[in-house]
Amino acid sequence: MKKIIAQIEARFEKLGFFIYAQPWRVILAALVLFGVLASQVPQIVIDTSNEAFLEPDDPILTQYDSFRDQFGRDEVVVVAIQPKDVFERQFLERLKAFHDDLESEVPYLDEVISLVNVTSIKGEEEELLVEELLEDWPEDEEGIAVLKKDVLSNKFYKNLLISEDGTFTTVIIRSNAFTGEDTLTEDSEFGEDMFEDEGGSDSAENSEVTTLDETPEGRITEQQNTEFTTAIESIVRRYTTPDFPTNVAGSPVMTGVLKDEMMSNIPRFTLMALGLIGILLLLLFRTPVGVFLPLLTVIMSLISAIGLMAVSGTPFTVVTQILPSLLLAVGVGYSVHLLTIYYHHLQRNGDKEKAIVFALGHSGLAILMTSLTTAGGLISFLPAPLAPVSALGLFGAIGVLLAVFYTLFFVPAVLAVLPVSKKRVSPNDDGSSLADSILGGFGMFAVNRPWTVVFGSILLGLVAVGGTTQLRFSHDVISWFPEDNSIRRATEVIDKNLKGATSIEIIIDTGKINGVKDPDFMQRLDDFNRFAERWSDGKLLVGKSTSIADTLKQIHQALNENQEEFYVVPEDRDLIGQELILFENSGSDDLENVVDSQFSQARITVKTSWADAGSYTEMIRQLEEKANELFGDAKEIIVTGLVPLLTRTIDLVMLSMVISYSAAAVIITLMMILLLTDWRLGLWSMIPNFLPILMGLGVMGALDLPLDMASMLVGSIALGLAVDDTVHFLHNFRRYFHDSRNVSEAVSNTLHTAGRAMLFTTIALSIGFFVYTQATLKNLYSFGLITGFTIIMALLADLLLAPAMMTLIYRNKTTDN
């Protein structure tokens, strides 16, 4: 194996001669590759939607898409307003003006619903009156009093448009699910033709559904959603006053706020990382080239990776936004290892060609080895069922390999054409520097007291295990924001006063045309609504559960002199059909939101409070259980909507963590065995890498930091990065042990040569992650804090535990294994 390694190193030396002989060709080739990929960067998109977490073919997402194809978008913007008096004339006039401006100015708008235009169903002299609530404006205080009584007594309005105590009112704004297409085809629109078989004919009741509404194309994009929410926020700002206080919430707004945070965070943290790493490079090399060249290399690698993302149509998400800082921190380490050896050799011999050849021959294999282990850690995310995590694994690994390519080809070529600086450019070589003293002190302590270090490490591991028992999974986007954030405050206000800021959608498919009109089916819909509204686990509440049964009961009551006792589901199928005909003939399109055009599918909307996604599991289980109990004869029961989408996401967070951690452990262990050409040493070498991961998870548990979409990445990323220093340490240790046959001398020489680069890369990596502790989003803060901590612990493990283990393994050996 030594012969193979020597042959590989010799090939890297030949590469050095080739690059030195034709530097401009190499530079041109690298710049052409960079230029082609960089030209695609403007095409990159940012996607912060809830759907972006799932793969396009995920069954929960495909069900959700089918639901939106049929019923439109369930995600709405809710503007909650708490005036001094909801029913004061001046407020109602301002509410109407606000409503009208929303309708006229907001793009991609489907509908605006408020007290201004909500459907009012009344009976008057055996006639059904279906009109907008404020179609006839109250002319005096008596009219206002009647309006107030009608609103507060209407069960349908409560916790939807008016709070139970009448102090809050809402404006609900829904965007189109599609861009420019109607959600129903001409042949399937609601109209009288849908009632041709009324009267309960067997042919209508037993007919099977043979056609479905066509699926429109062109769902609303992230950019269009941004335009939609931006227009709303602009109008809200215009109208907000002390007498018209507003709280704006809803998934579309939250998506927009997340996007704004990302667009702010990515350049800010990238520049912070570049600046801090640049300072470290200046301290290390003390020459402009030593600063400029590594930074240029990692910037080229980063832009190239983003260009590939754009080409493939992969968006930036709340997960992949960490890619820039990750690649900056990782990529600069490769250049540092190469330049450290280059300047070291150049200082001693003064020959630039020999310095380039020696640097590539000495460090090329180690750089390639460490890049493969880092890429291996990232590739472990590839099989993850969460789309952003899988994308991070793919493009993170590609970015790392691009960084290696630019380091091994572009950097030596640039060094070849630049004049040699007469200034001393390498750190002190006499071993007397503070860094050398510290590194050597760690190493000698481990060599002289190996069992102390080993037992201390075991004790730390046991303490960390205790911390991991407190770990919990979480997916709660609202909790990522600071407590004083407007979207978080608004969501909490709406939850408290209107008992729900999100919803669960349940579709009951009877499998029969006009099957929904069956009286027994309608009654079961109503029974389910009442069950849902009574449900509570002490934390979650259901503010409202609605279906076509609620509309039918309003119609039936109105047609019976508005008497309270007639707010029930009619028992006669013919009567149900006739009442629905009257309602449709009034011109209202409300039924489009609660039933399909063939009356074969009924929609139930359960409005509930916002919570961590894991909190909904029991609620969904019980609602699904009740639905199966009541509608066991249905063709299909589908539970969908935003809440099931969120619970699916947290399930996949847990699954992704198991898959990625297992894959990373197996992939990197196999790589270490292959790279070190000794299966025993390869297995032993993983101990200093697994321990820091365990400590990081233990600290998360102790600090009550949840495992979420970002923090679950810590283990695999940190493992792939931590193993780099282990590779450098063991690669150099075995070389020096072979020469000296003395463990103490081999450890000392390793830390005096590779140690500085290990120290620098650790500092650079930890900076790249610690910058996220300045993020306003708490999930990024946790990710940056724990990953940075883990990287530092990994260095300490390589400075203490690795030398201690090598002392115990090699103390009885006189030659290299």
Image (cartoon, rainbow, N blue to C red):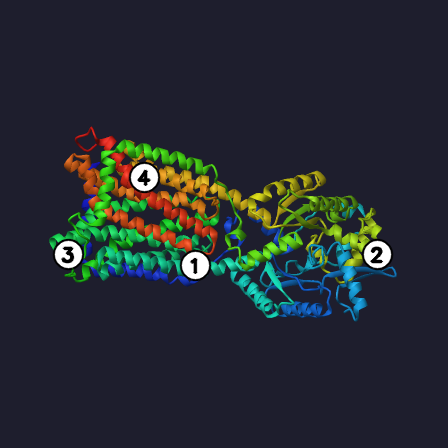
Q: Tell me where residue 180 appears, x and y as whole percent.
A: 59, 64
Label 3: element kind: helix
Q: Left or right: where does residue 376 sit relative to residue 227?
A: left
| Disc 4 target residue | 671
Q: Earlier in the sequence, mark 1 or mark 3?
A: 1
| Disc 1 target residue | 265
Kindly indicate the quadrant of the structure image that contains residue 272. bottom left
* Label 3 to label 2: alpha-carbon separation: 96 Å
Q: Amino acid at mark 1?
A: Asn
Q: Residues within 10 Å of mark 4 (few under 14, many from 20)?
A: some
Q: Tell me where residue 538 appears, x and y as whole percent.
A: 64, 43
| Disc 3 target residue | 352
The answer to whether residue 219 is visible is no
Image mark for residue 204: none
Q: Residues within 10 Å of mark 3 (few under 14, many from 20)?
A: many
Q: Residues within 10 Å of mark 2 (few under 14, many from 20)?
A: some
Q: Quadrant of the N terminus?
A: top left
* Label 2 to label 1: alpha-carbon separation: 57 Å
Q: Earlier in the sequence, mark 2 or mark 1?
A: 1
* Label 1 to label 3: alpha-carbon separation: 41 Å
Image mark for residue 562: 2
Q: Left or right: where does residue 97 sit relative to residue 228?
A: right
Q: Earlier in the sequence, mark 4 or mark 1?
A: 1
Q: Nearer the viewer, mark 1 or mark 3?
A: 1
